[in-house]
Amino acid sequence: MTALTIPGLDQAPTTNARLLTWVQEVAELTTPDRVVWVDGSEEESARINAALVEAGTFVPLKKKPNSYWAASDPNDVARVEERTFICSVDPADSGPTNNWMEPAEMKAIMLDLYRGCMRGRTMYVIPFCMGPLSADKPMLGVEITDSEYVVASMRIMTRMGEKALARFTDDAEFVQALHSVGAPLEPGQADVPWPCNDTKYITHFPEERTIWSFGSGYGGNALLGKKCYSLRIASVMARDEGWLAEHMLILKLISPENKVHYIAAAFPSACGKTNLAMLEPTIPGWRVETLGDDIAWMRFGEDGRLYAVNPEYGFFGVAPGTDYHTNPNAMRTIERGNSVFTNVALTDDGDIWWEGMGEKPAHLTSWKKQDWTPESTELSSHPNSRYCTPMQQCPILAPEWDDPKGVPISAIFFGGRRATTVPLITESRDWQHGVFMGATLSSETTAAAVGQVGVVRRDPMAMLPFIGYHAGDYFNHWIQLGKNANAEKLPKIFYVNWFRRGDDKRFLWPGFGENSRVLKWAIERIEGKAAAEETPIGHVPTPADLDLSGLDAPAEDIAAALDFDAEEWRAELPLIEQWFTKIGDKLPTSLRDEFEALKQRLG
Ligand code: SAT
Ligand code: MN
């Protein structure tokens, strides 16, 4: 078959030569039955959703407008870090924390997999833009995919279709993102509701700003604007151009005096970024507005401050544990409809349910499409089940969410999930010390990635699976940005841990809305209004330094949550040493110096 016979291929709504050539090449390689140029219209969306319902991928929800339940293949539920590659030309540019393969070798393997892989399917061409469309230099991309689920999800998660294509000038640069579920259909062969392939590759060619993904339909593996573009590829662009692409939420904190501070916070996947981004403060008079829950692109403004933009257009949040108590604003966002729920449970009356959503219904259809009752021994929803919902439906969305200038960041939080050792909050001594905190961040693994859950690992800046180049160079980039900036105007860096536990494993700090007390202390430190104790690891508040008025929690627990324990930290030192050894000789000497100084202070 020659490409010209593929219906739709010649209906390109663009004159961008690079795009036209690439689409032609991919169509010839993957031989789909037809090509659709995605315009992002309502009609098209209705068509795609209807096709997904027809295929059994989507079940329409009776209780939520224009919303759908989807259950994945049970083997395709999370990011596959083992199958994720940074194929830089030089292996030294991928570094010790990424998988690497020689680009030509990887391409040969993947070209073999891609050959004919869209047979029997439709190839969709999705032009998209990460970040505001009105940016001087819009951050463009095109995803080619054979998955309707991906088209429907990209419509929620990115600015896509005609409105993005309008920013494609004839010579516009864009990230090429190729995706296939890897499940060609023979003539007459019936499709399955969740096509995918046991062989999976999530591959990045950083020098070419190109992404090749094969075999998975799961969010982080398949929605290529998200982790693949906005973190792995963008972190390389950011290194080259002097900015930061980070795994951070962005929130706006408003004091009772209407003073505004913006905070960016990095936590590993499934450690509460969405909850913090949408928090309802429990302290009177304080308010939070949301700008993003997962990714922040930060550039210095003309005034020397660091400005953050959220490249995304929707939220792809962990469902279990989300309810009107833990995250009322996420619940209000999804109530408005237009959402896709993947791997949660389906109620008999056509709504969704997951663990943590209050009383257990008498009967559900589980994420494995099996009958589920409160007596069932299995969970109704996968721990990494997700809601995918438009950002603009969030009732506390900050009005400046779409401003291409971004918002000036006052504080950066690094945080992980640690049962011991790490206090509720620690303020860094300066930028370099803050970068050390980020570079040595540790967290227990979660269900967001395939693998064992609950194992402590170093997760620098919560970016371990997302740094698109050598981690040592990445640390150096952070250090250099600080050196070149006006220190007075840099955000203050804090290290937080909401997950410290008592002897009986109970959480010491209540979390959620009460985290506003921690935010308040951080802002008051920046404003020079709050006290702290100097410890070997940084400045830590005593219970008296935090606003605990009206907090219903045992005083011993609060003290234990804030406690700096020298013994625990001395036990941490060999782990940091190991980690730095792994980074090797690209570790900046300034971080080595920070480590030696910490050792000294710990005695
Ligand atoms: O990788 S996803 O973006 O799908 C979810 C996550 O791990 O943060
Ligand atoms: Mn994430």
Image: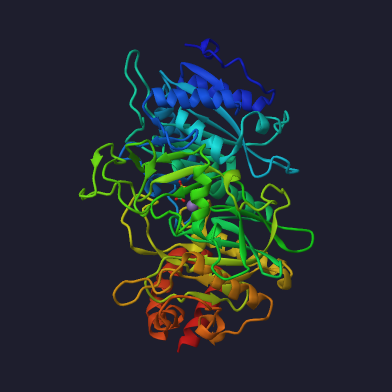
x and y, in percent, of residue 523 in the image? 64, 72
| Nearest to the observer: residue 489 or residue 30 | 489
Q: Residue at x 32, y 19 (%)?
A: 190
Along the line of sight, the residue nearer the viewer: 128 or 270: 270
Q: Position of residue 535 (x, y in %)?
A: 52, 85
The residue sitting at 30% across, 40% down in the picture is 74
Q: Is residue 210 visible?
A: yes
Q: How many numbered marks does the figure carry?
A: 0
Q: Is residue 270 left or right of residue 292?
A: left
The structure residue drawn at horizontal position 28% and vertical position 36%, both measured from the top left corner, is 369
Is residue 467 shown to the viewer in this render?
A: no
User: Quick check: 414 left or right of 353?
Assistant: right
The x and y percentages for residue 209 are 58, 41
Please state the horizontal and vertical placement of residue 84, each as a whole percent of the image. Answer: 43, 46
In the current view of this chain or complex, which residue is farthest to the right?
302
Position of 65 relative to 357 (above/below): above
Where's the C terminus, which quadrant? bottom left
The foreground one among 164 and 233 is 164
| Scheme of image coloration | rainbow
